[in-house]
């Protein structure tokens, strides 16, 4: 399911760039924003973007912990990070497109898998560092997939759909 959505998101983006190339090669065409707009109030946007910056801090901390090979710190940082949906205002959750919701759920699962693998017992012949790096790359597939697909559009509260 999650894989299918990512493929969909990536497909959307690649289709967008092909049609962009077919247009005149002016920079305005190249940089035109083809992402799907999600209507949101200013206060909701502030809250979600705060969470987004926390994601970036979290990835930063996970990378530092990985460099120290401190798997306990990796797990402690990663476990609570993915539950973005739980921290979003209820009014917002209900209005998110289905794919947006699926991407957040899949990202949460990837964070939990990362935490679980980081805490798993060392097994002979298993390279845990490599595994956790792979898990981290998987998490970031969802960051990029969602960013490539959606943008927020601030509207007055009454005009939100
Ligand atoms: C389900 C969708 C989704 C996922 C998953 C997601 N983001 Fe975002 N993120 C957004 C949207 C939408 C914006 C606003 C983009 C816009 O309006 O231009 C955003 C904005 C941001 C910003 C800009 C914050 C600011 O203050 O302007 C950062 C940083 C960010 N995301 C980091 C991350 C990281 C790191 C991850 C993965 C761990 C992640 N995001 C996962 C949807 C998502």
Image (cartoon, rainbow, N blue to C red):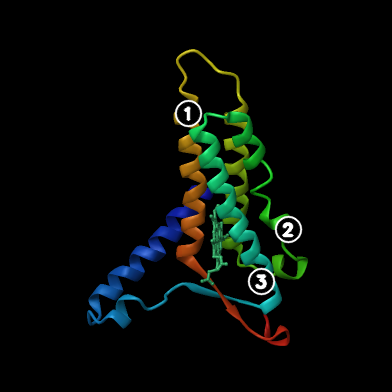
Q: Is mark 3 within 8 Å of ligand 1?
A: no
Whether residue 52 is visible: yes
Closer to the camera in the image, 7 or 144: 144
Q: Residues within 10 Å of mark 3 (few under 14, many from 20)?
A: few
Q: Residue at x 35, y 76 (%)?
A: 31
Q: Is residue 29 above or below residue 89?
A: below
Whether residue 1 is visible: no
In this rendering, which labeled residue sits more in front, label 1 or label 2?
Answer: 1
* Distance Cα–Cα, label 3 vs label 1: 35 Å
Where residue 129 is drawn, which disc sits there?
Answer: 1
Q: Position of residue 59 (x, y in %)?
A: 54, 47
Query: Mark 1 and 2 residues: CB-CB less than 8 Å, in contact?
Result: no
In this rendering, which labeled residue sits more in front, label 3 or label 2?
Answer: 3
Q: Position of residue 147 (x, y in %)?
A: 49, 63
Instruction: Check the picture and name the quadrant holding the C terminus.
Output: bottom right
Element at badge 3? helix
Q: Residues within 10 Å of mark 2 (few under 14, many from 20)?
A: few
- Ligand 1 shows up in which quadrant of the image? bottom right
Element at badge 1? helix
List the single residue furthest toward the right. Answer: 90
Q: Residue at x 49, y 12 (%)?
A: 124
Q: On the image, which quarter does residue 155 sit in?
A: bottom right
Query: Mark 3 and 2 residues: CB-CB less than 8 Å, in contact?
Result: no
Q: Position of residue 16 (x, y in %)?
A: 35, 70
| Residue behind mark 3 | 46
| Residue behind mark 2 | 87
List the single residue furthest toward the top. Answer: 124
């Amino acid at each position: 399911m999650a894989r299918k959505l990512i493929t969909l998101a990536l497909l959307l983006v690649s289709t967008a760039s092909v049609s962009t190339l077919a247009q005149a090669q002016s920079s305005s065409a190249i940089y035109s924003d083809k992402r799907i707009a999600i209507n949101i109030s200013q206060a909701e946007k502030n809250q979600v973007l705060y969470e987004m910056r926390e994601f970036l801090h979290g990835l930063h901390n996970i990378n530092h912990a990985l460099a120290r090979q401190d798997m306990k710190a990796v797990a402690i940082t990663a476990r609570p990070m993915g539950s973005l949906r739980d921290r979003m205002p209820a009014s917002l959750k209900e209005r998110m497109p289905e794919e947006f919701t699926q991407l957040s759920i899949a990202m949460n699962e990837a964070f939990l898998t990362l935490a679980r693998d980081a805490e798993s017992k060392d097994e002979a012949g298993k390279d845990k560092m490599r595994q956790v790096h792979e898990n981290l790359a998987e998490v970031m597939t969802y960051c990029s997939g969602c960013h490539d697909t959606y943008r927020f559009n601030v509207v007055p509260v009454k005009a939100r759909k």
